[in-house]
Structure formats: C-alpha cells, structure tokens
Image (tube, rainbow, N blue to C red):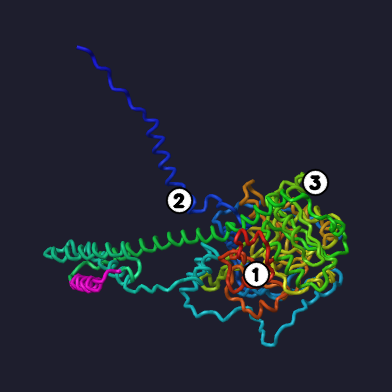
Amino acid sequence: MKATPPPAKRRRGPRLAVLALVFCSLLVPIAFLFNRFPAVYVTDERPQQEIDLPSFERLGLGRGDGVIEVRREDGTSANAEIKDAPEIYRGSSSIDSRHHTDTEPSKVSTKPKVPPPPKIEQRKPEAKPVPVPVQHKKDVSGNNMKPAKVQNADDVEKAKACQLEFGSYCLWSIEHKEVMKDAIVKRLKDQLFVARSYYPSIAKLKGKEALTRELKQNIQEHERVLSESTVDADLPSFIKLKIEKMDQTIARAKACTVDCSNIDRKFRQILLMTEDEAHFHMKQSAYLYNLGVHTMPKSHHCLNMRLTVEYFKSTSLDSDDSNAHRFNVPDHRHYVILSKNVLAASVVVNSTVSSSEETENVVFHILTDAQNFYAMKHWFARNSYRESAVHVINYEHIILENLPEFSTQQLYLPEEFRVFIRNLEQPTEKTRMEYLSVFSHSHFFIPEILKDLKKVVVLDDDVVVQRDLSFLWNIDMGDKVNGAVKFCGLRLGQLRNLLGKATYNPLSCAWMSGVNVIDLEKWREHNVTKNYLQLLKKFQHNDDEASVRAAALPISLLSFESLIYPLDESLTISGLGYDYAIREEVIRNSASLHYNGNMKPWLELGIPDYRKYWKRSLTRDERFMDECNVSP
C-alpha cells in the first residue's frame, strides 16, 4: 500500500500580510479624519495656531485675566518646558525694557478694533504718530461691531467652547446653520428615541408580551422608514398612520408601572450616544472646513502651473530688467510682501498703487518660495501697475546662497494665533477669544536681503489698501524699530509661561502684523536679527515644523519688546477673515483691510460681505485666469 505524503503546511505569512493591509486601509481614512497628514496643495501654510499653556497666577493687570490658552487650528500642540530666555541685546543705544510701560489699562472686548495706542515713556522726544488721512462720517461711532444677535448664556458658552476646540469653523457654522424644515422626520426621530428608552423596561414586565411585540414592531418600522428617508418629501404617504400608531403605543407604555431609574438610565445612555455622534459629525465637518481653507483650489493651482510653463516657453527667460536700478534706491518708497499666492500678492500691489497719488518712486519687493517663484515672476512681467516697479525675489535661493548660516531657509508667511482668555475670578462668565497675527521667522531676514534700504513698509498678502500710505514714510519713529498697531487685548504678562524668564514689561501690549513700518537702520543698530537667532535656540524645542512655527509668537513679541512704535488704530481694521460682525461703515473708512483668519477672500469659504472689497483690486481680462476658470 502506497503511503500518501502528508498535506503541505499552509504558510501563515501571506495571510498575516493581507490582514495587515486590510487593517492599514481602515486606519488611513481615520488618520486623515483627524488631520494627521497634510492635505494636497496648500494655499499658504499658515493655519491659525494653538498651543496649550498651563494656567497662570493672578497678574496685576487691573482686570483679573489670568488663564490664557493659545491653540493651533490643526490640533497639534507644541507646548513644552521653556528654557530661560536670554536678556535681549539692544546695542549701545538700547532702551531698557523695564522702563518701557504701557500705562493704559486694557479692556475686555471682542471687537476687532484695537484700543487706542498707549503712551510710551521714551528717553528723548519723538514725533507724534501721523494720523491716517481718512474722512470719517459723522454717524460713525467708536463701535466696530454690528448689533449683536440676542443669545442666551448657554448658547454663548457653547460657542466659546466650540471655538476653543474647532476655532473659526464654529463662527462659519453658526452663520451657515440651516434650520431643520423637515418636521415630520424630526418627530419620527423623537418617537424612536422615546420608544427605545421604554422598550427594555416594558420587555421585563409580566403580562405585557403583546405591548412588547407592538413596541418592537413600531421601532423596527420607524428605523426602516428613517433609513430610506431623510427629508419629509421622501416619506411614504401612510406615514401619518405610523406616527399615530407609535403615539398610542408610547402612551400605553407610559401608563405601565416601571422602574423610573431604568428609564432614566436608558435616556441618558441614548443621549450620550447621540451627543457622541453629533460631536463626531462636527469633527468631520470641522476637518472638511479646514481642508477647504488650507487647500489651494484647483483653478489656482492651474493658474500657477500655466504661468510657470509660460515663463519657460517665453523667448526671454528673464523679465524686463529696466526697473532693476530702482530696487535699491533708499529714497524710494519700498513695500515688502511675503506671499506664495499670485492672486493675493497682485491684489496687495494693485490696491496699494490704485490708492497712491504718486507711484513713480514706489517699489514692491515680493518674497516668495522656489515653487511659486517663476509663476510670480511671469505674472508681474505680464501685468504693469502704473509707474511702480515690482521686484520678485526667490527667498529660499537667497537664504541658501547668500546666508547659509541661517537654519531657517524655508519661507514662512505671517503666523496667526487665536488666544482664549479666561478670567480667574469669574472663569465661566468673562471669557473671550482673541485672534492675533505676528511676524514669521522669514520676516527677521528682510534686513539681510534688502541691505541697501533704510525703511520699508511690510504688508501681509491678505491686506487690501484703501488709502494712500505715503504718509507712513513721514513718521519719525525715534529709536523704535517696528511701527505697528498695538493689540492691548493681550498683555505680555498674560503669556509669562510662554515667554519664559526674559526681561520684559508684563503690561506691554501685543501688536499686530498686517501693515508695519520697519526702520531697517534701527533694526541693524539694535541687532534684532541676532536677538531673534538667540531666542530661536531657546524656544525651538524640536526640528519639526509645528515647533518652529509655534515659536514665532513668543519670539516676535520678545524681539520687538520696547521697540514698537504705536500706529493709529484707524490705519487698518483686522478680523475680516473670521469676524462676521464688522460694520460696513468702519470697513469703508479704514485705510487698509486685514483679512486675518482662515476665511481668506480668495476662497469660496471667505465671508461674502467682505470679499467684494478684495475683488475690486483683482486683475481682470487675464487670459490664464479665464482658461483656468479662476473666479474668486
């Protein structure tokens, strides 16, 4: 008899590999849902940031604001133990920051309009800030906000808690909230909710088998109808009979003697499940919102690609250099813009030129990255803006070739933070959310790139200029370096755990980027870039991008502490990228508009009432825009 060979052993390796692949395929959507990976083409890598900070001791700030939480919109946290920050070296003519005080008490306010600039104690007399030449109408009050909608205390607290977790998505969702019109579907869901709560208790009662079967049957029928219909129009014609039948069954169930604790427990379980499901859907919606505000639209990507290809197809790879001699003339009016967005940069240039009386001596220096350099260069070679000159600079190439000692070679756009402020004495009542934009790491190398210039005005690429800004060159800032609109809704002392042990006045106000006058000579004299590099070593805890960008807030505030010259608050109105309540009169009368926030005007998610001011300065009749269907 011939022996049969033993059956071959099955290999477990392929089966395990298949199971691993299936498991990974399930994890990938979850990872993207919680925003653990970057999303496709990025518009401007500057989502609003959040960093969780520990609670503070009470500060003598005159209002009791003590607990500050600064958070990133993408959910990552870069908070870590901060090493002792060095005392900032200011040079021979430095001003001791301990003698620099902001004496005006700050006020709790949610208005985007910044309080009047505080008085500054200075060693020598300086010229007063030149007022912005804006014609105000008589009926314009000091309030920037539209009349607030009446809300109860619970809704206000829910909105604040939502902003703390999801940021400006909550503001957008409130404005776009749709009232549920399908009353019948809602009633079916309510009936199903009550029936499920009573069913376990009724099923345990003796002699109620018929009621139990009827209740179970009604629950199954309701579930079947709701699985097929989401609006009233999809409901079957006999639905009224189903509703009446369920009402009768629920009434009979309520008439039974049952343990109320069991019913209460079941109600709570279903309520918690419903809240968890609602929170999950809110997370999904917030992720899609963030994806929409941080992802470049397909038409914009098309425009960049077409401009880049056209640049290399053109007969001359270099644009006309007839204006090159104007780029380094110190007496000209030089504007600096950091941008990776062609349309955004063009709107800043066009609005500034259109608002200027004279443009012969106006020069724009646009710092962009290597990826968008050729598209930006070709756009401004194709389009002229009166007599002004536009100088497109490859920031990354300049840093790599001429300044290799600097580790921060990537172009960073202005950083935006949102700060949640809670009052220690009344933590549940007096809370507010403030939005702040500051210089990025790339701003600190402007004096090294533009070595021949003495004074520049730095404009964010989400700014629209409405008045002639030539008066900014007439301001005598004395020994100050950075002319900015102060933001006294936030004091440096409230950020003591973030700023470390550096020497600073706790009553000093924060400040806003957007429109900034920079005295490059004083910058070099005070060694601001050197101080920045020292602070970077202290505040950058890791090499990851999140840690680098999170460090921009404390570094910007400390680098210019006691070196800020307060500009008139009417110079710019901020908040057009998140605040729906800014009055139209205030917008019209402001010298410039700052769309800080996630809802940028070139996105479909931009606030419709404010986008029209940005569109006015958008270039028209551009062939590539038509071919790529660009219609912001």
| Residue 398 placement, left or right of 24 | right
Task: Name which residue lies at 58% across and 56% down.
Answer: 298
Instruction: State the CA–CA distance, disc 2 to disc 3.
Output: 44 Å
Q: How far apart are marks 1 and 3 (CA)?
A: 38 Å
Report whether 233 appears left or right of 198.
Answer: right
N-term mark: 2 or 3: 2
Residue 224 is tagged as none
Image spot of residue 332 (x, y percent):
86, 64
Q: In which quarter of the image is residue 389?
A: bottom right
Provide residue 568's location: percent of width, then percent of height.
75, 74
Mark linked to residue 615: 1
Q: What is the three-letter code of the residue carrying label 1?
A: Lys
> Which x, y percent locates residue 317?
77, 49
Q: What stretch is highlighted in magenta?
A: 235-255
In this rendering, which labeled residue sits more in front, label 1 or label 3?
Answer: 1
Q: Is residue 219 left or right of residue 108?
A: left
Hey, which quadrant is residue 420 in on the image?
bottom right
Tag 2's secondary structure? helix
Residue with the mark numbered 2? 30
Q: What element carries label 1?
A: helix
* Label located before the other in sequence (1 or 3): 3
